[in-house]
Amino acid sequence: MGAPARKTQPGKRGWARRCAVQALYQWQLTAQSPSMIEAHFLAEEDLQKADTAYFRELVHQIPARVTEIDTALDPLLDRPLIQVDPVECAILRIGAYELMQRPDIPYRIVLNEAVELAKVFGAEQGHRFINGVLDKLARGARPVEFGALS
């Protein structure tokens, strides 16, 4: 009999992504400024486990690039982005941002992290939707990484 499966805790960047999902969800629903949301999270939430610099990057850069990100996501979706669950929309935007702006993070890690976020925060089968959309985006945004696999 094998050892029981072990759930690993997210690293500092993983915690930053978790907090960023919540912050971006708040931004989407309230239209508060990223600076106001960041200040709230730094004051009210436990960010000791998180890479706060990365959290700040996500909370500020995703809203700043939302048009570019949404334009990249739109053709990959089976419905308008406005109809995507707000939590899943936040996760898609984080994954898209990382695929498009952070080539230092391998696409497999981006996809895995997004799927894990969807399992924690999203709908029951939301992780499949997230994986499918971001996989398509990764193929276009990271052709060199996919070419290396061939």
Image (spheres, rainbow, N blue to C red):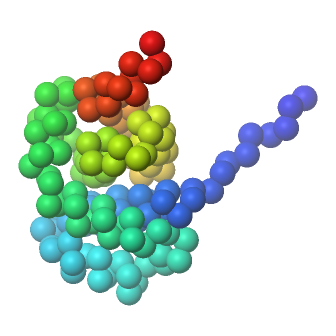
Residue 12: % across, % down: 53, 64
Quadrant in which residue 73 is drawn: top left
How many numbered callouts? 0
| Above or below for 38 versus 29 | below
User: In which quadrant of the rendered image does the N terminus lie?
Assistant: top right
Q: Is residue 83 visible?
A: no
Q: Residue furthest top?
A: 150
Residue nearest the observer in this picture, 22 or 102: 102
Residue 20, image x, y percentages: 35, 62
The residue that appears at 40% across and 27% down in the rendered structure is 145
Image check: 145 left or right of 81? Answer: right
Q: Residue at x 15, y 73 (%)?
A: 32
Residue depicted at 17% across the width and 60% down the height: 63
**Left or right of 123 on screen, residue 58:** left
Quarter of image, res 16: bottom left
Furthest residue in direction right, as rendered: 1
The C terminus sits in image quarter: top left
Q: Residue at the location (57% across, 56% down)?
A: 10
* Residue 1 in view, yes or no: yes
Q: Position of residue 11 (x, y in %)?
A: 57, 59
